[in-house]
């Protein structure tokens, strides 16, 4: 397995990876997802040329990192790839005070707890999300 920080994914890779784990909201506009990924810190796991996993986040590089996605293809899960992605991401951001992850998936919540993360209820943290309707930029 080859782990590499990359700057982008192809539309085909986005469709294959996100589709395989049923994260279909990313597939409503794959080009927009690609632009978002290009503005994130992205660590990939590849088996040869095949993209099998990714972790991506956004950070100010000093005080906080938000992990947006940690995905491993189903046929590659439970082989330590997600743990390695998280460990390398954590090492890359070792100077940053805190890493924040929000998930609605209980299996992923258990994975993060096993990796040493604390649930918000254990840290007196409340998470808020305000959905936005994005406007088309006028240039």
Image (cartoon, rainbow, N blue to C red):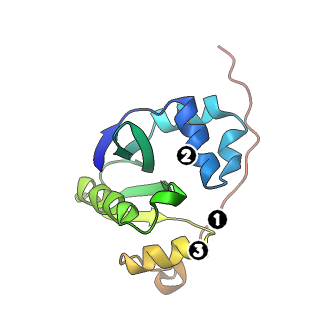
Check the image and report above or below for 53 versus 100: above
Left or right, residue 138 beside residue 50: right
Q: Is residue 30 left or right of residue 55?
A: right
- Is mark 1 in CB contact (under 8 Å) with mark 2? no
Residue identifier under label 1? 128
What element does badge 3 sit on?
loop
State the CA–CA distance, disc 1 to disc 2. Answer: 27 Å
Name the residue rendered at 40%, 76% in the picture: 117
Q: Residues within 10 Å of mark 2 (few under 14, many from 20)?
A: many
Residue 80: % across, % down: 35, 66
- Give SS at disc 1: loop
Q: Is residue 15 visible?
A: yes
Q: Which mark is residue 126?
A: 3
Alpha-carbon span between mark 1 and mark 3: 7 Å
Q: Quadrant of residue 112?
A: bottom left
Relative to 75, is 124 above or below?
below
Front residue of this view, candidates 5 and 95:
5
**Residue drawn at (51%, 30%), measured in percent from left and top?**
10
Mark 2 lies on residue: 17
Outermost residue to the top: 139
Q: Is residue 125 visible?
A: no
The earlier-in-sequence mark between 1 and 2 is: 2
- Name which quarter of the figure residue 36 lies in: top right
Distance Cα–Cα, label 3 vs label 2: 30 Å
Q: Residue at horizontal 46%, vertical 63%? A: 77
Decide: marks 1, 3 in contact (CB < 8 A)? yes
Residue 24: where, in percent of width, then height?
A: 70, 48
**Quarter of the rendering occupied by the C terminus:** top right
Q: Residues within 10 Å of mark 1 (few under 14, many from 20)?
A: few
């Amino acid at each position: 397995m080859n782990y590499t920080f990359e700057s982008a994914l192809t539309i085909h890779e986005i469709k294959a990876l996100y589709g395989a784990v049923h994260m279909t909201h990313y597939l409503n506009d794959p080009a927009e997802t690609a632009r978002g990924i290009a503005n994130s810190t992205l660590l990939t796991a590849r088996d040869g040329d095949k993209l099998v996993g990714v972790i991506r986040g956004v950070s100010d590089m000093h005080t906080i990192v938000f992990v947006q996605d940690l995905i491993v293809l189903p046929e590659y899960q439970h082989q330590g790839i997600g743990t390695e992605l998280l460990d390398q991401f954590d090492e890359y951001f070792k100077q940053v005070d805190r890493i924040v992850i929000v998930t609605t998936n209980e299996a992923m919540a258990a994975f993060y707890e096993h990796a040493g993360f604390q649930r918000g209820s254990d840290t007196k943290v409340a998470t808020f999300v305000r959905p936005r309707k994005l406007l088309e930029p006028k240039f």
